[in-house]
Image (cartoon, rainbow, N blue to C red):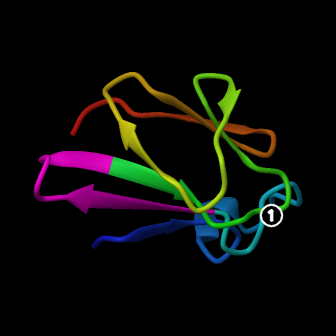
Amino acid sequence: NLPLLLGRVNPLFSNEGDISRQHAEVNFDPASNKYTIKDLNSTNGVLLNGQKIAPNMVYELQQGTKIGLGKVMVVVVQY
């Protein structure tokens, strides 16, 4: 279900101290038919392919995009 909240509220990241409780949000934009991500003003920020993104701004995700959350790296494999 979207939006997908990435953070310690998600059991996958519950033990990751460098990830905020509500770190980032993945959503789907039906107008552009694309998935997006937004940093929810997290303490340690979000990296897309190694570049820090601005908080509360929406960024497009593409296949192969590497998402950095604290010390964790997530790769968009397919959608």
Q: Quadrant of the C terminus?
A: top left
Up the image or down, 13 lies above or below 1; here it is above
Q: Nearer the viewer, residue 41 or 14?
A: 41
Up the image or down, 18 lies above or below 79; here it is below
Residue in the image at 76% along x and 50% along y:
45
Residue in the image at 58% along x and 23% along y:
49
Task: Please tell me whether the stretch drawn in magenta is mainly helix, strand or loop.
Answer: strand
Amino acid type, mark 1 = Asn
Up the image or down, 21 lies above or below 37; here it is below
Q: Quadrant of the N terminus?
A: bottom left
Residue 35 point in image, percent of width and height: 28, 48
Q: Is residue 77 left or right of residue 70?
A: left
Residue in the image at 67% along x and 23% along y:
50
Judged from the image, the secondary structure of the residue bearing numbered disc 1 is loop
Numbered range of the magenta stretch: 24-35
Residue 15 point in image, percent of width and height: 80, 63
Residue 66 point in image, percent of width and height: 53, 28
Q: Is residue 60 left or right of residue 28?
A: right
Residue 27 lies within the magenta run: yes
Residue in the image at 36% along x and 40% along y:
60
- Residue most extreme to the right: 17
Residue 18 point in image, percent of width and height: 86, 54
Q: Nearer the viewer, residue 13 or 26?
A: 26
Q: Is residue 75 left or right of residue 60?
A: right
Which of the 4 quarters of the picture holds residue 8? bottom right
Residue at the spot of label 1: 15
Residue 43 lies within the magenta run: no
Q: Nearer the viewer, residue 20 or 60?
A: 60
Badge 1, how many Cα within 10 Å: few under 14, some, many 20+? few
